[in-house]
Each structure stands twice: as C-alpha cells, then as structure tokens.
Image (tube, grey):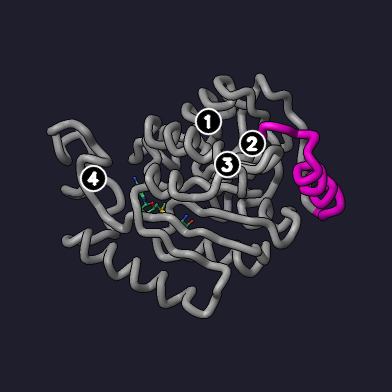
Amino acid sequence: MYFVMGNRDALIQQYPKRGVWAEIGVYRGDFSQKILEICEPSELYLIDNWRFEIRDHNPFSDEAENFSGFAGKIHWQHFGDDPNATQEQNYQHVKTRFAHAPQVKVVRANSIEGIQSLPDSHFDVMYVDANHQYEYVLRDMMEARKKLKPGGIMQMNDFYEGPGGAEQNLGVMGAVNTFVKRYDFHYVAMSYGSYADVMITDDPTSSYVKQFIANLNNSDLTFVGISDPLVPNIRYKFYRKANGDTRFLAML
Ligand SMILES: C[S@@+](CC[C@H](N)C(=O)[O-])C[C@H]1O[C@@H](n2cnc3c(N)ncnc32)[C@H](O)[C@@H]1O
C-alpha cells in the first residue's frame, strides 16, 4: 500500500483518464466537479438521497445529549434548521451544475438502492462517501463491489482515525478493514492527513491498477510503501506548528 503525501485530489490525478466512475454521496458536487475535470470520465453517476433523517445518523433516542459540540444538532450542522430544505437546494444545485455534461447521470436514491440500480461489472472506480457509520459504509461497499470491473478501484473518503473527526461517528476505517478481509481485497494507496482517502482493489495486477501506480511513480508526489497488515493500525498525531498551522503525523 502506498501512503501518499498528498490529498485526495492528488490521488485522483493519477487515475487513467476516461474511466467509468460513480460517486456515492455527492452533497453539492464539489468533488464530482473535480472528478469531471481531472479524470475526464466517460460516464459519471452521482448518487445521493439528498435527504437528512436524524435516525440515519444516530439510531438512539438521546438526540444531541451526547454530541455536545453540535449545539443541539447531530452531525453536519451546516444543513441548518431545515435540513431537508437545504438538501433539496443541494439536489437542485447539482442538477443545474452538471446539466451541461451528458456523461453525468444524477441518481437521487438511498445509496444501497442507487448502487443496486447500476449496471454490474461496469465501473473502473466507485467513490464511496455517503453515510459514514460502520454498517452503512460496509453495506455500500458490499453493493459497490458488484458494480466494479475486475481490477477496478473502490475509493473511500474519511479513512481516518484522529482528532479531526472527534465529533463525528466515523466508521470508515473499521468498515474498510472488515471489507478487505471479507472479500480478499487489497489496499492500493491512501492520501495523507485528516479525512484521508483510501483505495482498494480485488486485483492489484490489473492493467488499471498498474497504470495508476505507473502514473504515481511518474508524478512528483512523495510516497512510501507500507505493508498491508499495518494499514488498520494507522493513527494520526496532531501537532500545532510554530506558525499556527496544523500538522498531522501518521503513526504506524
Ligand atoms: C460528505 S457528503 C459528500 C461529499 C462529496 N463526496 C464531496 O466530497 O464533495 C455526504 C453525502 O452523502 C449523502 N448521504 C448520506 N447518507 C446517505 C444514504 N444513506 N444514501 C444516499 N446518500 C446519503 C448526504 O446526503 C450527503 O450529501
């Protein structure tokens, strides 16, 4: 597994162009825009339910009691007092934003049903960034793997354990590590810093993965190889530099 000293934008710059992509969890389409511009996908499916249900984020009845940092709201307070109205605006924004791009298909659905509606063995890349709780991520991945071409790549956002996610119920690391063991997938690369991305594949010898690694080798990015058994133990230590900047150091 390559631990890359760059963010997720740096990772997607290494993908072969004109692949078939899906992004699950779109929000306002900011990353979709980057996928479109950087990766030039031949098809890009954008799946999101553009809804907000409190029970999807906290299945217990304690509401905000145990989430003190969120001033009465659980997760994503930027959805505002009327989260579903905000989500409707987000959906309209995404539809308008990509109306000019015939390769983009917007699918408004819960992630699992949305993924199930896609063609099987069709995708070079499935980018998973919807509900970040363990069971949701794991289930999204279980469905997404059926849609990947052999040797395609699944990329997950927020593969991270560290202080930056202290107020969130991030289950991505656990879910990815469970999935990798259960389905015999292999880590390919991950980005650096808080809210990192990780990439996995069922076949690290595929031409698609090889091209990604060749592109990474030819880039000016710094990266190190770490053995797969160490990956589930990656943690970050947080430093404040003299100039006030934040620095995250990966601990293995
Ligand atoms: C973190 S945001 C996605 C951000 C986007 N990928 C980006 O990088 O700009 C998560 C999105 O997932 C969507 N989402 C959460 N749970 C979902 C579910 N169960 N089904 C479909 N979409 C869901 C939310 O509506 C939200 O827009």
Residue position marked by numbered label 1 in the rendering: 176
Q: Which mark is residue 248?
A: 3
- The residue that disc 4 covers is 74
Q: What is the distance, in whole Å, between disc 4 and disc 1 at their CAs?
A: 24 Å
Dot 2 lies on which element?
strand
Q: Is mark 3 within 8 Å of ligand 1?
A: no
Mark 3 burial class by Cα count in 10 Å: few <14, some 14-19, many 20+: some
> Magenta region: which residues?
201-220
- Predominant secondary structure, magenta span: helix
Label 3 to label 2, Cα distance in Å? Answer: 23 Å
The amino acid marked with disc number 4 is: Ile
Amino acid on which disc 2 is placed: Ile
Out of 162 and 17, give the one closest to the viewer: 17
Label 4 crowd bin: few (<14), some (14–19), many (20+), radius 10 Å = many
Element at label 3 = strand
Q: Position of residue 224 (x, y in %)?
A: 77, 36
Closer to the camera in the image, 126 or 66: 126
* Left or right: 250, with 203 as reference point: left
Q: Nearer the viewer, mark 4 or mark 2?
A: 2
Answer with mark 4 or mark 1, whichever residue precedes in sequence.
4
Of the numbered discs 1 and 3, the one sitting upstream in the chain is 1
Label 3 and label 4: CA atoms lie apart by 26 Å
193 vs 128, left or right, is right
Disc 3 and disc 4 in contact, CB within 8 angstroms: no
**Tags 4 and 2 touching, CB below 8 Å:** no
Please give the count of numbered marks on the rendered protein.
Answer: 4
Which residue lies under the disc numbered 2? 200
Q: What amino acid type should be assigned to the residue bearing mark 1? A: Val
- Residue 118: % across, % down: 49, 50
- Residue 131: percent from left, percent from top: 37, 43
Foreground mark, 4 or 1, reads 1
